[in-house]
Amino acid sequence: MPLGGEAPEYSRHLGRIRTEQFQAALDRFGLGSLVRAEPIGSGITRQNCFVSSSAGRYVLRGGPLWPNQFAEERFLAEQVHLHTQVPAPWPYLVDDSTDIFGWSYALMPRLPGLPWPDFWEGRDAGARLGVARALGRGLALLQELRWPFAGAYDASAGAVVPFPAGCEQRVIPGIRKGFEAARALTPDQVGDADLAYVEGVIGRAEPALRVAFEPRFVMPDYKEDNVVLEPTAEGGRVCGVFDLGGHFGDGEAALARQRAMYLERDPALAAAFVGEYLAARPPRPGFAERLAVYQLNERLEIWEWARRTGVARWDPALSLRAWLLPFVE
């Protein structure tokens, strides 16, 4: 938005922001004079807007959705920056005070590259398969980030804290909790037959979940919307990843979100995405059974969120099991 005029609303989440507020945020980190601020039309949470100054191009991320969101993202951005070949927004500057906007915020460099809708525009089906393969390669490269144990960053401790009972005993209770949330929200579509199906998927996977692994960075929301791309002879390359959140555990779990989105669009894209990842990270025994559990966990989260917020795009008469089958099986 050009300077001057009435303060525009940058999103429903961020609200109206005045020119002098942007300048105050830039001043706090010595980032030059404001040239332009622009809303970003994409994204579910709408926490971000673009800010250009005499010193460069930035993203302002405001209004944390949970306590210590920005502290966690800063930690993960630094780790990705230091230990992988995938560019992350760094330095990730956090101001915990609320005197400028009424909420805390972060400022970070804007990554080069194109968002996937712009990158796909005008490309044929073969080129789109190339993008799916690029996402698979990008995830494998992102998981160059390893950790000595499975756990998650705890801002109060300022360190990664291990999961008390390991990943297996974290994901299974999470699935059962997600199922109960789905049943409470949509009792007409979730019943005992759905519970039997969910428990069957878990039961078949339990031995596979006990197969040892080296903990790697798991970004549950790894998807096209959270990367930028650049063209290559192979079809494309992930040249940046953002909206970082996650934990350290079984890297295969990070396949679930983008795989499901590709299955909705074209199963060939899902196969290309997963295949490229596995070419770089050969699977351990029991991969199919584990992926079913990770996909089940991810889809239960989506069912609950989509029904609660009213954005579900599928037939409302479908039972939970009927909706899950194409993704999990």
Image: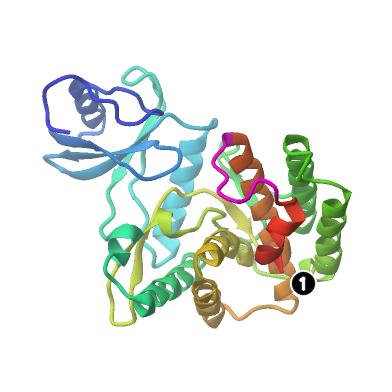
Q: Which image quadrant for residue 204?
A: bottom right
Q: Indicate yes or no whether the magenta region holds residue 152.
A: no
Q: Amino acid at mark 1?
A: Val
Dominant SS in magenta: loop
The residue range painted magenta reads 309-317
Q: Is residue 31 above or below residue 114?
A: above
Q: Is residue 161 visible?
A: no
Residue behind mark 1: 211
Q: Is residue 190 left or right of residue 236?
A: right
Q: Is residue 30 visible?
A: yes
Residue in view at x 56 percent, y 66 percent: 263
Q: Is residue 34 above or below residue 176?
A: above
Q: Is residue 202 left or right of residue 320?
A: right
Q: Quadrant of the C terminus?
A: bottom right
Residue in view at x 44 percent, y 75 percent: 133
Q: Which image quadrant for residue 256?
A: bottom right
Instruction: Name the residue nearer the viewer: 320 or 28.
Output: 320
Q: Is residue 157 left or right of residue 129?
A: right
Q: Residues within 10 Å of mark 1 (few under 14, many from 20)?
A: few
Residue in view at x 51 percent, y 65 percent: 262
